[in-house]
Image (cartoon, rainbow, N blue to C red):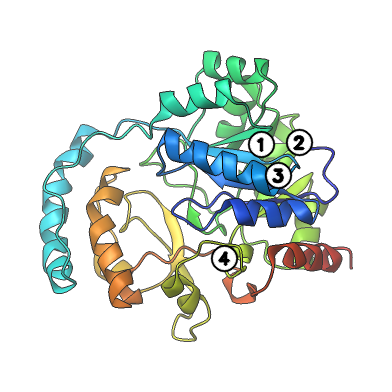
Amino acid sequence: MTDLALPVLAAPMAGGASTPELVAAVNAAGGLGFLAAGYRSAAALGEQVARTRQLTDRPFGVNLFVPAASDPAALAALPAYRERLRPEAAALGAELPESIPADDEDWAAKIEALLADPVPVVSYTFGLPGPAEAAALRAVGTAQVATVTSVAEARAAAALGMDALCVQGPEAGGHRGTYQVAAEPGREPLTALLAAVGAAVPQPLVAAGGLGDGPAIAAALGAGAAAVQLGTAYLLAAEAGTSAGHRAALTDPAFTGTALTRAFTGRIARGLRNAFMDRHEGRAPLAYPEVHHLTAPLRAAAARAGEPQSMHLWAGTGYRIARRGSATELTLALWRAAQG
């Protein structure tokens, strides 16, 4: 990542917002775009990689969700949460799954595909690869980046030989990348977390979380980051796959802020505060991805019905300054603003 014209990364946003077109547009500005492999099969990821190569000849990255088994006690609480959600789902015309099969994110197949057809960069969220997997990807020339939310996670990533660490602060939209589902992530602001991680490990740091304008980017770089990663800043970009309902909510004055919740997926995530969060916060089992799969039909039905109060509207604290337009121009404008 040291040869980037602009030290700006497009965050991998699973669920559709990250697209090959968004990757290519950020690359065209001199940054580094990431595909999101989360919630995709290995075959679907391969299609996105092929499409990205058609659109850009510059390096790009792929982000993997690291799977982990949920605690049996958390799984045992799923039926009660299903019953709690059932009336709301029925009102939206959605049927909740009565059983949820195991989901390992097609991990082994994705690793195999990335070894057979390497990409320049692979990043990890929710944990780390095994030592043999990390060594194999290193051997085919892939640089590796670990998402970390604490000094302890940073030390574990450094010990595994990660090339860089993406330090994700509490301001970030979407899931906080803690290595344990039940972990309560720290609330230390991004700049303070950067300083703490920088003092603990030697790897270059990428700052992520709430970086929606030039001053915030400049502050992160001044706090020791070698680059910044932006997600929410691109949600309204022309090339993003953000749904129509999500786009509308980001600019709707009825949404007055963001909040952290487990209600949608069982993992801590930040999104626009809505009625679903208020109704169900504190009730979701700490089971991921099982709660994600449980609520998926309800959320999809809410999107079809144009009911944002029951949708997951992931967004970081800087969502109010997200702008429409080409991601290429947005990236260049943000970098110019960061230069003062």
> How far is the residue under mark 2 from the one under mark 1?
6 Å
View extreme (right): residue: 340
Q: Nearer the viewer, mark 1 or mark 4?
A: 4
Residue at the (67%, 66%) spot, across then down: 212
- Secondary structure at badge 4 equals loop
**In the image, 250: left or right of 320?**
left
Estimate the spatial distance between the alpha carbons at disc 1 and disc 4, rounded to whole Å. 23 Å
Would you say the residues marked 2 and 1 are in contact, meaning their CB atoms lie under 8 Å apart?
Answer: yes
Q: Residue at x 48, y 80 (%)?
A: 256
Is disc 3 in contact with disc 4, using a CB cutoff of under 8 Å?
A: no
Residue 48 % position (x, y): 53, 43
Q: Is residue 129 visible?
A: no
> Vertical placement of 64 versus 340: above or below?
above
- 282 vs 112, left or right, is left
Nearer to us in this view, 296 or 261: 296
Look at the numbered disc 2 and give the secondary structure of its residue.
loop
Check disc 4: other Cα within 10 Å, few if <14, some if 14-19, many if 20+.
Answer: many
C-alpha distance separating marks 1 and 3 = 6 Å
Q: Quadrant of the C terminus?
A: bottom right
**Location of mark 1 (residue):** 165
Return the residue at label 2.
204
Q: Quadrant of residue 50?
A: top right
Q: Amino acid at mark 2?
A: Pro
Ranked by sequence position, the earlier of labels 1 and 3 is 1
Q: Are marks 1 and 3 in contact (CB under 8 Å)?
A: yes
In the picture of the structure, the residue carrying the numbered disc 4 is: 235
> Would you place residue 180 above or below residue 109 in this image?
below
Question: Tags 3 and 2 in contact by the CB under 8 Å rule?
Answer: yes
Q: Amino acid at mark 3?
A: Val
Q: Amino acid at mark 4?
A: Leu
